[in-house]
Image (cartoon, helix red, strand yellow):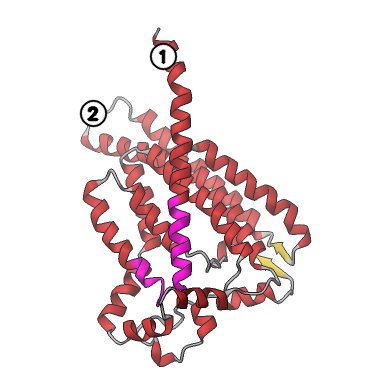
Amino acid sequence: MVSIIVAVTVLFAAIDVVWLPFSVISLDPRNFGHLAKAASAALAAYLIGRLVLYRLRDERSWAAGAMRWAADRLIVLVAVSTIFLPLGFVSAIFMYLASATQVPLVDGKLAALDAALGFDWRSFLETTNGSPPVAWVLVIAYHSLTPQVIALFLLYSAARRADKALEFVALLAVSSVFTGLLMAMFPAAGAYAYFDPPPETFDAFTAQAGMWHYSELLRLRSGDNFNLFVGNAQGLVTFPSYHTALGIMVVYSLRSVRWAAGPIAVLNAVMIIGTLPEGGHHLSDVIAGAMVAVVSILVVRAVMGLGRERYRPEQAATTL
Protein backbone atom coordinates (compact mmCIF):
# COMPACT_ATOMS: atom_id res chain seq x y z
CA MET A 1 0.00 0.00 0.00
CA VAL A 2 2.82 2.36 0.82
CA SER A 3 4.29 1.71 -2.63
CA ILE A 4 1.02 2.78 -4.26
CA ILE A 5 0.89 6.00 -2.25
CA VAL A 6 4.54 6.85 -2.89
CA ALA A 7 4.24 6.08 -6.61
CA VAL A 8 1.19 8.32 -7.03
CA THR A 9 2.79 11.10 -4.97
CA VAL A 10 5.92 10.99 -7.13
CA LEU A 11 3.76 10.93 -10.27
CA PHE A 12 1.81 14.04 -9.28
CA ALA A 13 4.99 15.79 -8.11
CA ALA A 14 6.74 15.09 -11.42
CA ILE A 15 3.78 16.35 -13.45
CA ASP A 16 3.56 19.48 -11.27
CA VAL A 17 7.25 20.26 -11.73
CA VAL A 18 7.05 19.87 -15.51
CA TRP A 19 3.70 21.70 -15.90
CA LEU A 20 4.17 24.68 -13.57
CA PRO A 21 6.66 26.62 -15.77
CA PHE A 22 4.13 26.56 -18.62
CA SER A 23 1.13 27.50 -16.49
CA VAL A 24 -0.27 30.81 -15.23
CA ILE A 25 -0.05 29.32 -11.73
CA SER A 26 2.83 30.12 -9.41
CA LEU A 27 3.36 28.69 -5.94
CA ASP A 28 3.07 31.12 -3.04
CA PRO A 29 6.29 31.05 -0.93
CA ARG A 30 4.08 30.50 2.12
CA ASN A 31 3.54 26.94 0.92
CA PHE A 32 7.07 25.94 1.83
CA GLY A 33 6.89 27.58 5.24
CA HIS A 34 3.68 25.70 6.01
CA LEU A 35 5.21 22.44 4.79
CA ALA A 36 8.18 23.02 7.10
CA LYS A 37 5.83 23.74 10.02
CA ALA A 38 3.79 20.61 9.30
CA ALA A 39 6.96 18.49 9.12
CA SER A 40 8.25 20.01 12.35
CA ALA A 41 4.93 19.39 14.11
CA ALA A 42 4.87 15.78 12.92
CA LEU A 43 8.45 15.21 14.07
CA ALA A 44 7.73 16.82 17.44
CA ALA A 45 4.60 14.70 17.93
CA TYR A 46 6.52 11.55 17.03
CA LEU A 47 9.36 12.35 19.41
CA ILE A 48 6.94 13.20 22.22
CA GLY A 49 5.18 9.89 21.69
CA ARG A 50 8.46 7.99 21.78
CA LEU A 51 9.62 9.88 24.85
CA VAL A 52 6.41 9.09 26.74
CA LEU A 53 6.69 5.40 25.85
CA TYR A 54 10.30 5.31 27.00
CA ARG A 55 9.90 7.26 30.21
CA LEU A 56 6.79 5.38 31.33
CA ARG A 57 7.83 1.93 30.15
CA ASP A 58 8.08 0.56 33.69
CA GLU A 59 5.20 2.45 35.26
CA ARG A 60 2.18 0.34 36.18
CA SER A 61 -0.30 3.02 37.26
CA TRP A 62 -3.59 3.62 35.44
CA ALA A 63 -2.48 7.12 34.43
CA ALA A 64 0.81 5.84 33.01
CA GLY A 65 -1.05 3.17 31.05
CA ALA A 66 -3.42 5.74 29.61
CA MET A 67 -0.51 7.97 28.59
CA ARG A 68 1.30 5.07 26.93
CA TRP A 69 -1.92 4.18 25.08
CA ALA A 70 -2.30 7.76 23.83
CA ALA A 71 1.38 8.03 22.86
CA ASP A 72 1.25 4.77 20.93
CA ARG A 73 -1.82 5.90 18.99
CA LEU A 74 -0.28 9.31 18.37
CA ILE A 75 2.71 7.64 16.69
CA VAL A 76 0.38 5.70 14.38
CA LEU A 77 -1.51 8.89 13.47
CA VAL A 78 1.74 10.76 12.79
CA ALA A 79 3.03 7.95 10.57
CA VAL A 80 -0.13 7.89 8.46
CA SER A 81 -0.30 11.69 8.27
CA THR A 82 3.32 11.88 7.14
CA ILE A 83 2.58 9.79 4.07
CA PHE A 84 -0.85 11.35 3.42
CA LEU A 85 0.02 15.07 3.53
CA PRO A 86 2.57 15.08 0.65
CA LEU A 87 0.01 13.27 -1.51
CA GLY A 88 -2.62 15.89 -0.69
CA PHE A 89 -0.20 18.73 -1.40
CA VAL A 90 0.99 17.63 -4.85
CA SER A 91 -2.46 16.41 -5.96
CA ALA A 92 -4.01 19.79 -5.00
CA ILE A 93 -1.44 21.57 -7.17
CA PHE A 94 -2.29 19.24 -10.05
CA MET A 95 -6.02 19.94 -9.73
CA TYR A 96 -5.33 23.67 -10.03
CA LEU A 97 -3.05 23.16 -13.01
CA ALA A 98 -5.71 21.04 -14.70
CA SER A 99 -8.35 23.72 -14.03
CA ALA A 100 -6.28 26.57 -15.49
CA THR A 101 -7.26 25.73 -19.05
CA GLN A 102 -9.05 27.23 -22.02
CA VAL A 103 -10.63 23.90 -22.94
CA PRO A 104 -14.40 24.43 -23.37
CA LEU A 105 -16.57 23.34 -20.47
CA VAL A 106 -18.60 20.19 -21.02
CA ASP A 107 -21.58 21.03 -18.80
CA GLY A 108 -23.90 21.17 -21.80
CA LYS A 109 -22.93 17.64 -22.79
CA LEU A 110 -23.33 16.40 -19.23
CA ALA A 111 -26.79 17.98 -19.01
CA ALA A 112 -27.72 16.37 -22.33
CA LEU A 113 -26.52 13.00 -21.06
CA ASP A 114 -28.62 13.45 -17.93
CA ALA A 115 -31.63 14.22 -20.08
CA ALA A 116 -30.99 11.10 -22.13
CA LEU A 117 -31.03 9.16 -18.86
CA GLY A 118 -34.39 10.72 -18.00
CA PHE A 119 -33.03 13.00 -15.26
CA ASP A 120 -34.08 16.67 -15.02
CA TRP A 121 -31.72 18.47 -12.62
CA ARG A 122 -33.84 21.62 -12.31
CA SER A 123 -36.94 19.62 -11.52
CA PHE A 124 -35.04 17.58 -8.93
CA LEU A 125 -33.73 20.78 -7.34
CA GLU A 126 -37.21 22.29 -7.11
CA THR A 127 -38.66 19.06 -5.69
CA THR A 128 -36.07 18.71 -2.93
CA ASN A 129 -36.13 22.43 -2.21
CA GLY A 130 -39.90 22.20 -1.78
CA SER A 131 -39.44 20.11 1.36
CA PRO A 132 -37.20 21.99 3.85
CA PRO A 133 -36.75 18.92 6.13
CA VAL A 134 -35.55 16.88 3.16
CA ALA A 135 -33.24 19.69 2.07
CA TRP A 136 -31.85 20.00 5.61
CA VAL A 137 -31.06 16.27 5.75
CA LEU A 138 -29.33 16.43 2.37
CA VAL A 139 -27.25 19.44 3.43
CA ILE A 140 -26.16 17.80 6.70
CA ALA A 141 -25.29 14.56 4.93
CA TYR A 142 -23.37 16.35 2.17
CA HIS A 143 -21.21 18.30 4.61
CA SER A 144 -20.56 15.28 6.84
CA LEU A 145 -17.94 13.81 4.55
CA THR A 146 -14.88 15.70 5.78
CA PRO A 147 -15.66 14.89 9.44
CA GLN A 148 -16.13 11.27 8.38
CA VAL A 149 -12.64 11.12 6.88
CA ILE A 150 -11.08 12.71 9.96
CA ALA A 151 -12.98 10.30 12.21
CA LEU A 152 -11.82 7.40 10.04
CA PHE A 153 -8.15 8.25 10.57
CA LEU A 154 -8.71 8.76 14.30
CA LEU A 155 -10.55 5.45 14.55
CA TYR A 156 -7.80 3.50 12.82
CA SER A 157 -5.13 5.25 14.87
CA ALA A 158 -6.98 4.43 18.10
CA ALA A 159 -7.27 0.80 17.00
CA ARG A 160 -3.61 0.73 15.90
CA ARG A 161 -4.76 -0.28 12.41
CA ALA A 162 -2.16 1.53 10.36
CA ASP A 163 -2.79 -1.05 7.65
CA LYS A 164 -6.42 0.03 7.31
CA ALA A 165 -5.49 3.70 7.34
CA LEU A 166 -2.85 3.15 4.65
CA GLU A 167 -5.31 1.15 2.56
CA PHE A 168 -7.65 4.14 2.66
CA VAL A 169 -4.85 6.54 1.71
CA ALA A 170 -3.99 4.21 -1.18
CA LEU A 171 -7.62 4.45 -2.31
CA LEU A 172 -7.36 8.24 -2.14
CA ALA A 173 -4.18 8.12 -4.19
CA VAL A 174 -5.52 5.88 -6.97
CA SER A 175 -8.86 7.69 -7.14
CA SER A 176 -7.01 11.02 -7.38
CA VAL A 177 -5.23 9.78 -10.50
CA PHE A 178 -8.48 8.83 -12.22
CA THR A 179 -10.24 11.99 -11.02
CA GLY A 180 -7.39 14.23 -12.16
CA LEU A 181 -7.32 12.62 -15.57
CA LEU A 182 -11.08 12.96 -16.07
CA MET A 183 -11.30 16.55 -14.83
CA ALA A 184 -8.44 17.55 -17.15
CA MET A 185 -10.10 15.91 -20.15
CA PHE A 186 -13.66 17.03 -19.36
CA PRO A 187 -13.62 20.35 -17.46
CA ALA A 188 -16.97 21.39 -16.01
CA ALA A 189 -18.31 24.17 -13.81
CA GLY A 190 -21.29 22.38 -12.32
CA ALA A 191 -25.05 22.32 -12.65
CA TYR A 192 -25.68 25.64 -10.84
CA ALA A 193 -23.29 27.49 -13.14
CA TYR A 194 -24.86 25.87 -16.20
CA PHE A 195 -28.57 26.13 -15.37
CA ASP A 196 -28.35 29.36 -13.33
CA PRO A 197 -31.53 28.65 -11.33
CA PRO A 198 -33.32 31.57 -9.59
CA PRO A 199 -32.50 31.87 -5.85
CA GLU A 200 -36.01 30.92 -4.72
CA THR A 201 -35.57 27.44 -6.25
CA PHE A 202 -32.75 26.55 -3.83
CA ASP A 203 -33.38 28.73 -0.78
CA ALA A 204 -33.70 25.66 1.46
CA PHE A 205 -30.09 24.82 0.68
CA THR A 206 -26.98 26.82 1.58
CA ALA A 207 -26.53 30.23 -0.06
CA GLN A 208 -23.49 29.11 -2.07
CA ALA A 209 -24.72 25.62 -2.87
CA GLY A 210 -22.62 24.13 -5.66
CA MET A 211 -20.90 27.46 -6.31
CA TRP A 212 -18.14 27.65 -3.67
CA HIS A 213 -15.52 26.94 -6.30
CA TYR A 214 -16.91 29.00 -9.16
CA SER A 215 -15.11 32.32 -8.71
CA GLU A 216 -11.83 30.46 -8.22
CA LEU A 217 -12.46 28.44 -11.38
CA LEU A 218 -13.19 31.58 -13.40
CA ARG A 219 -9.96 33.17 -12.19
CA LEU A 220 -8.02 30.10 -13.24
CA ARG A 221 -9.66 29.99 -16.65
CA SER A 222 -9.19 33.73 -17.27
CA GLY A 223 -5.54 33.35 -18.22
CA ASP A 224 -4.38 35.81 -15.56
CA ASN A 225 -1.49 34.93 -13.28
CA PHE A 226 -2.61 32.96 -10.24
CA ASN A 227 -0.64 32.70 -7.00
CA LEU A 228 -1.54 29.39 -5.32
CA PHE A 229 -1.44 28.91 -1.57
CA VAL A 230 -2.42 25.29 -1.11
CA GLY A 231 -3.67 25.94 2.41
CA ASN A 232 -6.52 27.98 0.89
CA ALA A 233 -7.19 25.64 -2.03
CA GLN A 234 -10.80 25.05 -3.06
CA GLY A 235 -12.30 21.78 -4.27
CA LEU A 236 -12.44 22.37 -8.03
CA VAL A 237 -13.49 18.92 -9.23
CA THR A 238 -16.99 18.83 -10.70
CA PHE A 239 -16.70 15.92 -13.11
CA PRO A 240 -16.41 13.33 -11.72
CA SER A 241 -18.07 13.85 -8.34
CA TYR A 242 -15.30 13.21 -5.82
CA HIS A 243 -17.83 13.41 -2.99
CA THR A 244 -19.46 10.34 -4.50
CA ALA A 245 -16.18 8.49 -4.95
CA LEU A 246 -15.01 9.35 -1.44
CA GLY A 247 -18.32 8.39 0.15
CA ILE A 248 -18.18 4.94 -1.44
CA MET A 249 -14.54 4.46 -0.47
CA VAL A 250 -15.26 5.39 3.17
CA VAL A 251 -17.98 2.73 3.31
CA TYR A 252 -15.66 0.18 1.70
CA SER A 253 -12.89 1.00 4.15
CA LEU A 254 -15.26 0.42 7.08
CA ARG A 255 -16.46 -2.94 5.75
CA SER A 256 -14.92 -4.83 8.68
CA VAL A 257 -16.16 -2.36 11.33
CA ARG A 258 -19.68 -3.73 11.63
CA TRP A 259 -21.04 -1.21 14.13
CA ALA A 260 -20.06 1.70 11.86
CA ALA A 261 -20.38 0.30 8.33
CA GLY A 262 -24.19 0.14 8.22
CA PRO A 263 -24.96 3.64 9.55
CA ILE A 264 -22.21 5.19 7.42
CA ALA A 265 -23.51 3.40 4.33
CA VAL A 266 -26.97 4.89 4.91
CA LEU A 267 -25.50 8.33 5.63
CA ASN A 268 -23.37 8.30 2.49
CA ALA A 269 -26.22 7.07 0.33
CA VAL A 270 -28.09 10.19 1.43
CA MET A 271 -24.91 12.24 0.95
CA ILE A 272 -24.61 11.07 -2.65
CA ILE A 273 -28.18 12.22 -3.30
CA GLY A 274 -27.20 15.53 -1.71
CA THR A 275 -24.39 16.02 -4.22
CA LEU A 276 -27.05 16.91 -6.79
CA PRO A 277 -28.86 19.86 -5.12
CA GLU A 278 -26.27 20.92 -2.50
CA GLY A 279 -23.08 19.98 -4.34
CA GLY A 280 -24.39 21.20 -7.68
CA HIS A 281 -23.41 18.06 -9.55
CA HIS A 282 -24.96 16.66 -12.69
CA LEU A 283 -26.18 13.08 -12.41
CA SER A 284 -23.41 12.18 -14.86
CA ASP A 285 -20.86 13.48 -12.35
CA VAL A 286 -22.28 11.16 -9.70
CA ILE A 287 -22.21 8.13 -12.01
CA ALA A 288 -18.63 8.89 -13.01
CA GLY A 289 -17.64 9.35 -9.35
CA ALA A 290 -19.10 5.97 -8.47
CA MET A 291 -17.15 4.39 -11.32
CA VAL A 292 -13.94 6.04 -10.08
CA ALA A 293 -14.55 4.57 -6.62
CA VAL A 294 -15.22 1.05 -7.90
CA VAL A 295 -12.22 1.01 -10.24
CA SER A 296 -9.94 2.44 -7.52
CA ILE A 297 -11.07 -0.25 -5.08
CA LEU A 298 -10.41 -2.96 -7.67
CA VAL A 299 -6.95 -1.57 -8.43
CA VAL A 300 -5.95 -1.39 -4.76
CA ARG A 301 -7.31 -4.89 -4.10
CA ALA A 302 -5.39 -6.24 -7.10
CA VAL A 303 -2.12 -4.62 -6.00
CA MET A 304 -2.60 -5.84 -2.42
CA GLY A 305 -3.33 -9.34 -3.68
CA LEU A 306 -0.22 -9.27 -5.87
CA GLY A 307 1.83 -8.18 -2.87
CA ARG A 308 0.52 -11.07 -0.78
CA GLU A 309 1.34 -13.57 -3.55
CA ARG A 310 4.90 -12.27 -3.73
CA TYR A 311 5.27 -12.55 0.04
CA ARG A 312 4.09 -16.14 0.41
CA PRO A 313 7.08 -17.89 -1.23
CA GLU A 314 9.46 -15.92 1.01
CA GLN A 315 7.38 -16.81 4.03
CA ALA A 316 7.43 -20.50 3.04
CA ALA A 317 11.19 -20.42 2.54
CA THR A 318 11.65 -18.85 5.97
CA THR A 319 9.45 -21.53 7.55
CA LEU A 320 11.43 -24.31 5.91
Q: Residue at x 44, y 45 (%)?
A: 298
Q: Position of residue 188 (x, y in %)?
A: 57, 72
Q: Quadrant of the C terminus?
A: top left
Q: Spatial distance from mark 1 to mark 2, Cα to Cα? A: 39 Å
Check residue 241 for magenta coloring. no
Point out the residue furthest to the front here: 116
Task: Please report the bounds of the magenta region as a residue range.
Answer: 271-294
Label 2, on which residue?
60
Taking depth in this image into account, of 69 and 225 the one nearest to the observer is: 225
Instruction: Give the answer, above or below, for where 11 lies relative to 182.
Output: above
Residue 143 in view, yes or no = no
Taking depth in this image into account, of 43 and 190 the one nearest to the observer is: 190
Check residue 293 for magenta coloring. yes
In the rendered structure, the answer to whether residue 81 lies left or right of residue 26 reads left
Instruction: Give the answer, above or below, for where 240 lies relative to 208.
Output: above
Point out the residue furthest to the right here: 22
- Give the prevailing secondary structure in the magenta stretch: helix
Helix, strand or loop at label 1? It is helix
Q: Residue at x 59, y 46 (%)?
A: 9
In the rendered structure, the answer to whether residue 219 lies left or right of residue 85 reads right
Count of numbered labels shown in the rendering:
2
Q: Residue at x 41, y 74 (%)?
A: 276
Question: Few, some or many C-alpha atoms within 10 Å of disc 2 (few <14, some 14-19, many ≥20)?
Answer: few
Q: Residue 316 bears which disc, if any?
A: 1
**Label 1 is placed on what type of residue?**
Ala
Q: Position of residue 23 (x, y in %)?
A: 75, 63
- Say which quarter of the image contains residue 270: bottom left
If you read the primary sequence from the N terminus, does the residue marked by circle 1 or circle 2 appear first? 2
Say whether marks 1 and 2 touch (CB < 8 Å).
no
Residue 48 in view, yes or no = yes
Q: Position of residue 152 (x, y in %)?
A: 35, 51
Helix, strand or loop at label 2? It is loop
